[in-house]
Image (spheres, rainbow, N blue to C red):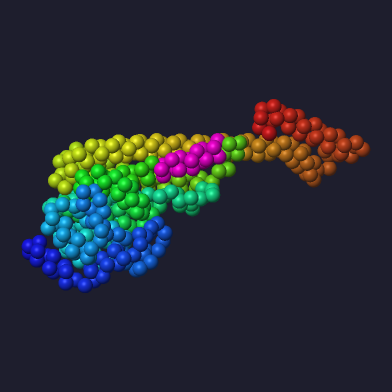
């Protein structure tokens, strides 16, 4: 089917027109809160850019795409938040998006990746957000993850966001303040999204480092053996979640920075190399944190072992001291008629004195050897 046929078919989709009108009429919405959209639609924004400047909205999404393709300049940026199959169907047909990529964008829970489908580029980024907490516990959530999918074509960008954080509103405003960058084409948006995501990685890593420093301080404090090991394991699990978001992104960024891609402007590739360098720093910090947490855990286990040994020595020392009166009293508790000093007037006092002196000597000996 020709492109004109596709446009005529999509134009008949009344639902798509209604969604596009909602995007054009309502004010910009920051979807960082749990509510998906106050208007019940997945469309966050739909804007046309020409020569790096926002073009005043005229008509709906279909007409905007027609105008851009007819004039051969500019591009359309459509932003979505957690769309369902019905909401995405008309958009997918309008931009001729591959069904596999559409399925990934709707279902989410994908690894960071970069895929090419004909003239369209599909990129997946894992977003992360630090969850504030007063004190790290064995059940504290430290890192919350989401996703941003980007469909990139020669004259369009479709961003699909999943999760309660990672709003692209501030990013869009920042790009609009730099029209020279937007004039380079849709690949500028892809770079801005990648840079935004990686910068969030570094911010979250700095916050996680504070938690690790606090755990390290608690473990090596005077009563470090009493630290709940569940706090350390929880921090390690959250760090693993962060690692799953950061590490797989290395290969897609390397491909964007080094390999020629038709829909990515050559002048934008240098910017991707800068983002790749920042990602490398994030990966190195996460690897260092992982080793540090392992060392902290081993140190904590060693402290617990030392504390248990100290407790066993104290128990053994007191057991040795108690053995003296137990032995003497046990001997004189036997039912024999002829025992030394059994009928002596001062026998009881002598036995008590011998027991007391023996226990005192043992106590002093154990104190000198630091068993008590």
- Most distant residue in the top direction: 368
Residue 211 relative to residue 331: left or right: left
Dominant secondary structure of the residues highlighted in magenta in the image: helix
Q: Is residue 117 above or below residue 6?
A: above
Residue at image location 41% in from the left, 61% down from the top: 34
Position of residue 226 relative to residue 145, above or below, is above
- Residue 323: % across, % down: 71, 38
Give the left or right position of residue 53, taking residue 136 as reference: left
Residue at horizontal 12 percent and vertical 68 percent from the top: 8
Q: At which x and y percent is residue 72?
A: 13, 53
State the image coordinates of residue 31 (x, y, percent, origin top left).
38, 59
Nearer the observer, 198 or 285? 198
Name which quarter of the figure residue 246 lies in: top left
Q: Read off the magenta span.
A: 203-220
Q: Nearer the viewer, residue 343 or 348?
A: 348
Residue 81 in the image: x percent, y percent?
Answer: 32, 60
Residue 200 visible in the shown view: yes
Quadrant assignment, res 1: bottom left
Instruction: Look at the image and say whether residue 137 sits in the magenta stretch.
Output: no
Front-most of residues 174 and 244: 174
* Residue at horizontal 15 percent and vertical 61 percent from the top: 66
């Amino acid at each position: 089917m020709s492109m004109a046929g596709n446009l005529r078919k999509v134009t008949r989709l009344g639902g798509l027109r209604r969604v596009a009108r909602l995007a054009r009429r309502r004010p910009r919405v920051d979807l960082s809160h749990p509510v998906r959209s106050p208007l019940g639609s997945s469309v966050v924004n739909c804007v046309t850019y020409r020569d790096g400047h926002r073009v005043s909205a005229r008509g709906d999404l279909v007409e905007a795409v027609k105008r851009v393709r007819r004039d051969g300049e500019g591009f359309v940026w459509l932003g979505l938040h957690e769309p369902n199959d019905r909401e995405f169907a008309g958009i997918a047909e309008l931009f001729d998006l591959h069904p596999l990529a559409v399925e990934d964008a709707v279902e989410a829970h994908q690894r960071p990746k970069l895929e090419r489908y004909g003239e369209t580029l599909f990129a997946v980024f894992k977003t992360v957000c630090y969850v504030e907490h007063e004190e790290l516990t064995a059940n504290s959530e430290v890192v919350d993850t989401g996703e941003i999918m980007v469909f990139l074509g020669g004259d369009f960008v479709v961003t699909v966001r999943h999760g309660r954080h990672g709003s692209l509103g501030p990013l869009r405003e920042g790009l609009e303040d730099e029209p020279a960058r937007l004039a380079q084409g849709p690949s500028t948006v892809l770079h801005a999204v990648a840079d935004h995501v990686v910068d969030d990685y570094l911010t979250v890593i700095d916050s996680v480092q504070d938690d690790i420093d606090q755990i390290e301080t608690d473990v090596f404090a005077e009563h470090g053996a009493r630290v709940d090991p569940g706090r350390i394991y929880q921090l390690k699990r959250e760090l693993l979640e962060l690692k799953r978001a950061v590490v797989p992104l290395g290969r897609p960024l390397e491909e964007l920075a080094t390999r020629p891609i038709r829909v990515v402007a050559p002048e934008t590739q240098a910017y991707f190399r800068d983002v790749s360098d920042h990602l490398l720093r994030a990966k190195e910090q996460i690897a260092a944190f992982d080793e540090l947490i392992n060392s902290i855990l081993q140190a904590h286990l060693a402290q617990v072992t030392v504390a248990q040994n100290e407790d066993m020595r104290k128990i053994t020392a007191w057991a040795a001291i108690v053995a003296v009166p137990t032995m003497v009293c046990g001997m004189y508790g036997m039912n024999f008629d002829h025992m030394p000093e059994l009928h002596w007037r001062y026998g009881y006092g002598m036995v008590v004195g011998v027991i007391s002196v023996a226990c005192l000597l043992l106590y002093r000996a154990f104190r000198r050897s630091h068993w008590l």
